[in-house]
Image (cartoon, rainbow, N blue to C red):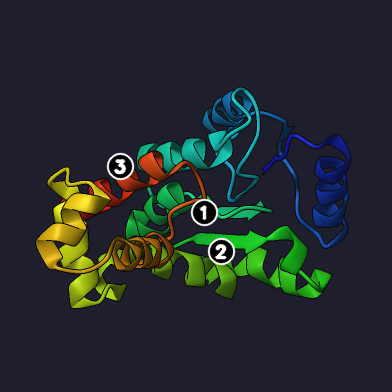
Amino acid sequence: MVAEDAVLLREGLVGLLERVGHQVVAAVGDADALAEAVCAERPDLIVTDVRMPPSLSDDGLRCSVRLREEFPGLPVLVLSQYVERSYALRLLDSCGGAGVGYLLKERVSAVADFTAAIERVAAGGTVVDPEVITQLVRLRQDPLERLSPREREVLALVAEGRSNAGLAAHLFISEAAVNKHIGNIFNKVDLPVDAEGHRRVLAVLAYLRA
């Protein structure tokens, strides 16, 4: 079964799968249709994108996670441009990681590799692009581990609501040094470039989660 909202790519995948000897029981363009088709057809494998209607966010991936819960062992191969990290972890953790794969479209360099991945996942194996693994490992690491002891001290004081001037006075350092520490904290915990106040809130949330 193929789930892909881009018509040309969907039809291309169908043609490719049929050309190498597979039967495509359904080809759909949104997550709701995917769920209905799986219930009706009980396919041996789903090949799905991440982003598709109805919300054009991570509907395909979230739907696949739900389907794996409803039909344990249902093989799913995600083929996408994106690593949707939170649901990717849930998908790869489901059913002990058996019968699941996650490939990035632009990194599939050979048809033979793609068809081999399909057969491996359908047989209960696991296939994950190395770039996907890199991003998921980065997600699971505690970003605060990258901070120096002084930066952790600064972040703890930020969490108490102290201003930069208050931080400088408490630590007996200049405000310029405080600004440097805070900039390093933002970079090390991978906070997006945004207004300073917003980044301070995100940094505090990261501190509280840790």
Identify whether 136 is placed above or below 29. Answer: below
Left-right relation of 6 to 53: right
Judging by the rendered image, the residue that carries numbered circle 2 is 121
Q: Which amino acid does label 3 sit on?
A: Val
Residue 65 on image: x %, y %: 43, 43
Q: Is mark 3 on a helix, strand or loop?
A: helix
Q: What element carries label 1?
A: loop
Q: Which amino acid does label 2 sit on?
A: Val
Q: Mark on residue 75? A: 1
Residue 139 on image: x %, y %: 39, 62
Mark 1 vs mark 3, foreground winner is 3
Identified at 60% across, 44% down, the residue is 50
Q: Mark on residue 201? A: 3
Identified at 60% across, 31% down, the residue is 34
Q: Which amino acid does label 1 sit on?
A: Pro
Residue 129 appearing in the image = no
